[in-house]
Amino acid sequence: MPDTTLVSSMQSALLGCIGGGVATGLNYLLTRRKYLAETRKLEYEAEKIRRELENAVASIPAAVGYITAGIAERLLYTSTGRELGYDFDGKGVRLSRTVNGKSEDFGPPAAGSFGFEGDTINIHRANIDGRYQLWLANYLIDGKEMRMIPKDESIEGDRLLRISCKARVVNGQHTLRFVLADEANKWLAHTDQTITENPENTWTPLNTYFQVSAAKQCHLRIDDLNVSKAPSSVYIRDLVLAEKTARSAD
């Protein structure tokens, strides 16, 4: 008959080895998962910084051209005093990226909704995934309502456009991407603006300038993405879209 004390000792030793192995394996998996998560976070932050720098550099020529062209402008849209429900369409979509020269969607879509409080736009986010798209679908040009900004054959080359608004975030951080796209939804120009919640709950003024072909119709889209927390909201007011029309007199 085997020595029960010896058997018990061997069982304890074996269980200890198994337990130690499991603990080591779990610790390895948790450490690796944490490492991968931190690596992805660092890669995301690096890509975000690179994209913001590219946007900033790309917008410099348009801003300089707009400012030096003088002060004459034609108003294409203003949200002030408007019934905004007639002017905007929106929905949540997935993020997109370019792979081998082709655009593809990935990840879950944005969950949320948009609404209006007087002449203020509210994009409410129920998750941090995807991007929420808001289209400006009603332009006010020379006293006429239009669904897109028409091309202008009287302009040789590019037209100069200015977008300004005020924004604030409740809970966390959001990025607003202003996109000008043609009638086939091909991007003509875009820029990103990041807004962070502040203790004073004050509004952040945003100004951006675009230089796009005058030979194409275009429309404005605002994407809400890179949301840090959910639920949260980003508010937009005093939205203005204007076009430089002439140089000031010397």
Image (cartoon, rainbow, N blue to C red):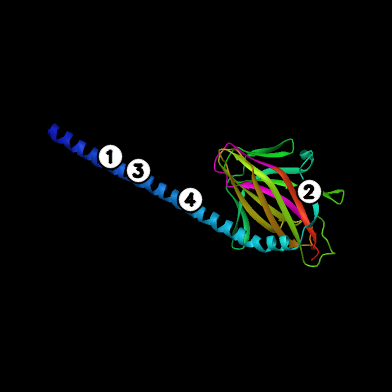
Which residue does the image show at 75% across and 51% down from the upper left? 241
x and y, in percent, of residue 139 in the image? 80, 49
Q: Nearer the viewer, residue 99 or 55?
A: 55
- The amino acid on which the numbered mark 2 sits, given as a three-letter code, is Tyr
Hey, what amino acid is under mark 1?
Gly
Q: Which residue is mark 2?
A: 77
For the record, the magenta segment spans 218-236
The residue shown at (35%, 43%) is 26
- The answer to whether residue 34 is left or right of residue 148 is left
Sequence-first tag of 2 and 4: 4
Q: Are marks 2 and 1 in contact (CB under 8 Å)?
A: no
Dot placed on the residue nearer the N-terminal end, 4 or 3: 3
Q: Nearer the viewer, mark 1 or mark 3?
A: 3
Which residue, given by chain and number where applicable, does mark 1 sit on? 19
From the image, state whether disc 2 or disc 4 is nearer to you.
Answer: 2
* Marks 2 and 1, how far apart at CA: 68 Å
Mark before the other along the chain sequence, 1 or 4: 1
SS assignment at label 4: helix
Q: Secondary structure at mark 3?
A: helix
Kind of element beneath mark 1: helix
- Asked whether the viewer can see residue 98, the reply is yes
Earlier residue among tags 3 and 2: 3
Residue hosting label 4: 41
Q: Secondary structure at mark 2?
A: strand
Residue type of the residue flagged with mark 3: Leu
* Residue position marked by numbered label 3 in the rendering: 26
Query: Which residue occupies 80% across, 51% down?
Result: 76
